[in-house]
């Protein structure tokens, strides 16, 4: 027997009386959110269910202390086919891009082409040495730049 597929939801806000979740895979899916709203609205511990299909957000209101117990919340959401993702699961890819390969999006490619054209121009005009000095100055002046480059997996060490 196959297990039912549970949609992954990210916890946006939790208190004893309210729970707000984002289900990114069901964004703009009003039919699914309506079915979940009806299923959760029939539960005795739930006082209100609001759904925003445009953002894929569900807001649940709880009666009493039903919203504070994580196991009870997980069981309640499982009846509607939802599971809560671990905390910061959506940020893990952004924190370690080297583990998942470098992505060449349009901005990165455009910046690379711009830097290559600038280097070519500096080489032809005789301004390569001042250009490299300016690059070194910027590198030393902005530690955030060094951190962003080292976060991409390129390891730069001082001698």
Image (tube, grey):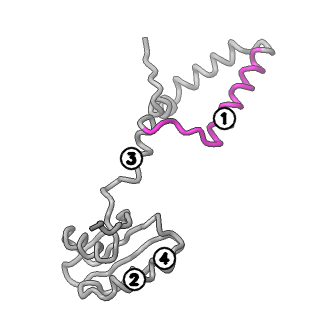
Specify few, some or many for label 2: CA neighbours under 10 Å numbering under 14, 14-19, or 20 or more.
some
The region drawn magenta spans 100-123
The answer to whether residue 123 is above or below residue 30 is: above
User: Residue at the spot x=65%, y=42% of the render?
Assistant: 106
Q: Is mark 2 on a helix, strand or loop?
A: helix
> Where in the figure is residue 42, as x and y percent of width and height?
31, 88
User: Mark 4: few, some, or many residues within 10 Å (few <14, many ≥20)?
Assistant: some
Quarter of the image for the N terminus: give it.
Answer: bottom left
**Residue underneath mark 4:** 52
Give the residue pinned by disc 3.
92
- In the depicted structure, whether residue 114 falls above or below residue 107: above
Indicate which disc, 3 or 1, sits on the residue closer to the N terminus.
3
Residue under circle 1?
Answer: 111
* Residue 157 sits above or below residue 10 on the image: above
Q: Nearer the viewer, mark 2 or mark 4?
A: 2
For marks 2 and 1, the one nearer the N-term is 2
Q: How crowded is mark 1: few (under 14 residues within 10 Å), some or many (20 or more)?
A: few
Of the numbered discs 2 and 4, the one sitting upstream in the chain is 2
The percent coordinates of residue 115 (x first, y second) are: 68, 28
Q: Quadrant of residue 133?
A: top right
| Residue at the extreme front of the image, as rendered | 1
The one nearer the camera, 138 or 155, is 155
For numbered disc 3, what is the local secondary structure?
helix
Residue underneath mark 2: 37
When asked about the image quadrant of residue 45, the answer is bottom left
Q: Which residue is at the front of the view, 110 or 139?
A: 110
Relative to 110, residue 29 above or below: below
């Amino acid at each position: 027997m196959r297990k039912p597929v549970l949609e992954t939801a990210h916890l946006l806000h939790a208190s004893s009386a309210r729970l707000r979740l984002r289900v990114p895979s069901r964004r703009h899916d009003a039919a699914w959110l309506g079915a979940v709203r009806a299923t959760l609205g029939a539960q005795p511990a739930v006082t209100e269910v609001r759904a925003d299909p445009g953002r894929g957000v569900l807001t649940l209101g709880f009666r009493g202390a039903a919203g504070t117990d994580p196991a009870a919340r997980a069981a309640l959401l499982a009846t509607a086919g939802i599971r809560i993702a671990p905390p910061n699961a959506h940020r893990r890819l952004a924190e370690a891009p080297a583990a998942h390969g470098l992505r060449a999006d349009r901005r990165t490619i455009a910046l690379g082409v711009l830097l290559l054209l600038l280097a070519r121009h500096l080489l032809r005009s005789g301004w390569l040495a001042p250009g490299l000095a300016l690059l070194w100055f910027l590198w030393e002046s902005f530690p955030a730049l060094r951190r962003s480059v080292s976060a991409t997996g390129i390891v730069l060490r001082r001698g």
